Amino acid sequence: MLELNGASAIVTGGASGLGEASVRALADKGAKVVILDFDRQAEKGDALAKETGGVFAAADVTDTEQVIAAVEAAKELGPLRAVVNSAGVGWATRTIGRDGAYESAHDLDMFKKVIDINLVGTFNVTRLAATAMSQVDPDEDGARGAIVNTASVAALEGQVGQVAYTASKAGIVGMTLVIARDLAPAGIRCNTIIPGFFDTPIYGDNEDMKNHLKKDTLFPKRLGHASEYASLACELLTNSYINGESVRIDTGTRMQPK
């Protein structure tokens, strides 16, 4: 088992939702966590850092220098052994418009933005954090650290209008085994979580939307709790024999076209 007590960790998108739950779970295991999130999340991030004994790092996951600064902050807290990449954005637009005009087709800049944040950002943090991990002392198994990335059931069953989001999350699933193979010589594992519908701030107080999503869940018939995601993230980080896997956590949900 990878020991997290006394180590440092980085959680992207860590100021709220799945990331926040992961920060708390890692702190409970004795890790000092760098909460990496956008500057607009600074108030929440600073409060969470104070509560959990970590630090907040305002950073864009696509900005190399800002991510390096967050990695260096983690190294000051302890040997960097864990990363949870949960930062991401969504966008809903169909590939073409109804009027047949070129101008109504899916906005290409928005497609690129979703890919850039979700996929490129995840890889950017992974490559830089893994570089720092490769320099820490290994344990008796030769392990130096582990990385958990976050995809979505949309990666496998994207709904109408989810083409950009689906492409970005499918890319995360697709690179999981390759990253695990790349990092194996350094004693670093990489796995991906494929979450279904989770009750996070993205839905706000929109109970109609939540009820709509619940109808497609199998059992239990509810949205997931962020703590359930965090529990799986910690298992994938600490269980030394899980590597290169993409694991669904969705009650058996299979998304319909819309």
Image (cartoon, rainbow, N blue to C red):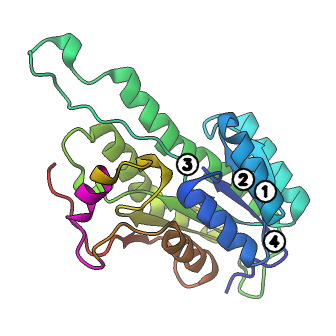
* Secondary structure of residue under mark 2: strand
Q: Label for residue 7? A: 4
Query: Is label 4 in contact with label 3 (beta carbons under 8 Å)?
Result: no
| Closer to the eye: label 1 or 3 | 1
| Closer to the eye: label 1 or 2 | 1
Write the residue at 68% across / 68% down. Answer: 24
Query: Is label 2 in contact with label 4 (beta carbons under 8 Å)?
Result: no
Label 2 CA crowd tier, 10 Å (few <14, some 14–19, many 20+): many
The type of residue carrying mark 1 is Ala
- The magenta stretch spans which residues? 209-220
The type of residue carrying mark 4 is Ala
Give the CA separation, mark 1 to mark 2. 7 Å
Write the residue at 80% across / 79% down. Answer: 5
- The mark nearer the N terminus, 2 or 3, is 2
Magenta stretch containing residue 211, yes or no? yes
The residue at which mark 3 appears reads as: 87
> Can you give x and y, in whole percent of width and height, for residue 108 in the image?
34, 22
- The mark nearer the N terminus, 1 or 3, is 1
The residue at which mark 2 appears reads as: 35
The type of residue carrying mark 3 is Ala
> Can you give x and y, in whole percent of width and height, for residue 113 in the image?
45, 30
Q: Evaluate whether residue 248 shows in this view.
A: yes
Left or right, 33 with respect to 221, comes to: right
The residue at which mark 1 appears reads as: 49
* Secondary structure of residue under mark 1: helix
- The mark nearer the N terminus, 4 or 3, is 4
Query: Is label 1 in contact with label 2 (beta carbons under 8 Å)?
Result: yes
